[in-house]
Amino acid sequence: MSEGMNARGLPAELLAQLLATRPAKRLGIWPRKGEIRVGTDADFALVDPDRGWTLEREELETRSGLSPYAGRRFRGAVVRTIVRGRTVYADGEITGAPGDGWFVRRLVA
């Protein structure tokens, strides 16, 4: 979001295609995932396009704890994540319980 919308001026609709629909199609899990429409799982993130934040090394979820983006300032932040209609992340806190997710099989070979 920081790079796509804010730095390059890409429309939100194109970002949704690039970050949700196209990966879901590539992974063979579309149309169940990757779009918001009747009959899909209702997974989506609500984003504040103006909220600024800095990626801190302590917040990295990697084994190495390394990232070329550590210390970098970004604009645009996820404020809520909804999975199958249930909030699992809100304002920096994971609110979903372990086991809330499930394995999604490819719909195409």
Image (tube, rainbow, N blue to C red):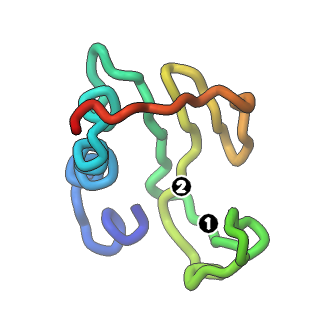
Looking at the picture, tell me which residue is in the foreground, 78 or 100.
100
User: How far from the left and from the top, in percent, is residue 101?
Assistant: 58, 30
For residue 28, the mark is none
Three-letter code, disc 2: Ala
The residue at the point 22 percent across, 35 percent down is 108
Labelled pair 2, 1 in contact (Cβ < 8 Å): yes
Dot 2 or dot 1: first in sequence order is 1
**Residue 37: horizontal and vertical position, in percent?**
27, 22
Callout 2 secondary element: strand
Say which mark, if any, is on residue 77: 2
Q: Is residue 85 left or right of residue 35?
A: right
- Which residue position is annotated with label 1? 53
Give the tally of numbered discs.
2
Identify the residue at horizontal 50%, vertical 32% (top origin): 103
Give x and y (percent) for residue 11. Answer: 22, 55
Which part of the image, by quadrant, shows the N terminus? bottom left
Quadrant in the rendering for residue 25: top left
